[in-house]
Image (cartoon, rainbow, N blue to C red):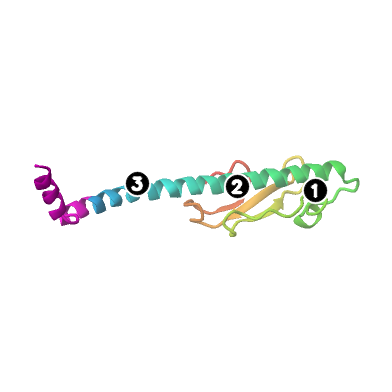
């Protein structure tokens, strides 16, 4: 009896084409679900990194304004070194940070960012500060 079962099992070699196609279809479905989720998570992480960089620059601007006796406009040059170890770079390398405003009560100095269109799946953000809205 066991010899007959053993012989039947040994005669079966490999998988059928239908079995292989079912596996390929299942893998395709899983990939189709995973890629949009991955892109969404990546975009949210990049936006969070940009917002964190803006907060860092805003903090350096406030420190600059509080400690400088002679009022000077904050810039990447005079913030880097004393208030920032280095000027932040965006997560994708295409975002540009700068200081905008004139220091008045209506338009105080603030950090802003320029993000080209479709960088994070959104429209362009020009001189956008916190919170970043598209």
Mark 2–mark 3 distance (CA, rounded to whole Å): 25 Å
Residue placed under numbered mark 1 in the picture: 83
Mark 1 or 3, nearer chain start: 3
Q: Are marks 1 and 2 in contact (CB under 8 Å)?
A: no
Secondary element at tag 2: helix
Where does the magenta region start and end?
1-22
- Disc 2 crowd rating (10 Å Cα; few below 14, some 14-19, many 20+) is some
- In this rendered view, identify the residue nearer to me: 41 or 101: 41
Secondary element at tag 1: loop
Secondary element at tag 3: helix
Q: Would residue 27 be found to the left or right of residue 108 on screen?
A: left
Mark 1 or 2, nearer chain start: 2
Mark 1–mark 2 distance (CA, rounded to whole Å): 19 Å
Could you tell me residue 131's position as x and y percent?
60, 41
Residue placed under numbered mark 3 in the picture: 33
- Disc 3 crowd rating (10 Å Cα; few below 14, some 14-19, many 20+) is few
Q: Residue at x 87, y 46 (%)?
A: 68
- In this rendered view, identify the residue nearer to me: 126 or 90: 90
Q: Residue at x 48, y 45 (%)?
A: 41
Q: Please name which of the two marks, 2 or 3, marks the residue nearer to the observer.
A: 3
Q: Would residue 31 be found to the left or right of residue 69 on screen?
A: left
Q: Which mark is residue 49?
A: 2
Mark 1–mark 3 distance (CA, rounded to whole Å): 44 Å
């Amino acid at each position: 009896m066991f010899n007959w079962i053993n012989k039947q099992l040994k005669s079966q070699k490999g998988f059928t084409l239908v079995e292989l196609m079912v596996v390929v279809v299942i893998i395709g479905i899983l990939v189709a679900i995973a890629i949009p989720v991955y892109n969404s998570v990546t975009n949210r992480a990049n936006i969070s990194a940009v917002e964190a960089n803006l907060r860092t620059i805003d903090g350096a601007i406030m420190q600059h304004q509080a400690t400088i006796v002679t009022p000077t406009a904050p810039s990447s040059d005079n913030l880097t070194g004393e208030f920032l170890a280095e000027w932040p770079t965006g997560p994708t390398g295409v975002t540009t940070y700068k200081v905008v405003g004139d220091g008045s009560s209506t338009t105080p100095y603030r950090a802003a960012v320029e993000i080209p269109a479709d960088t994070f799946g959104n429209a362009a953000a020009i001189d956008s500060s916190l919170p970043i809205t598209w």
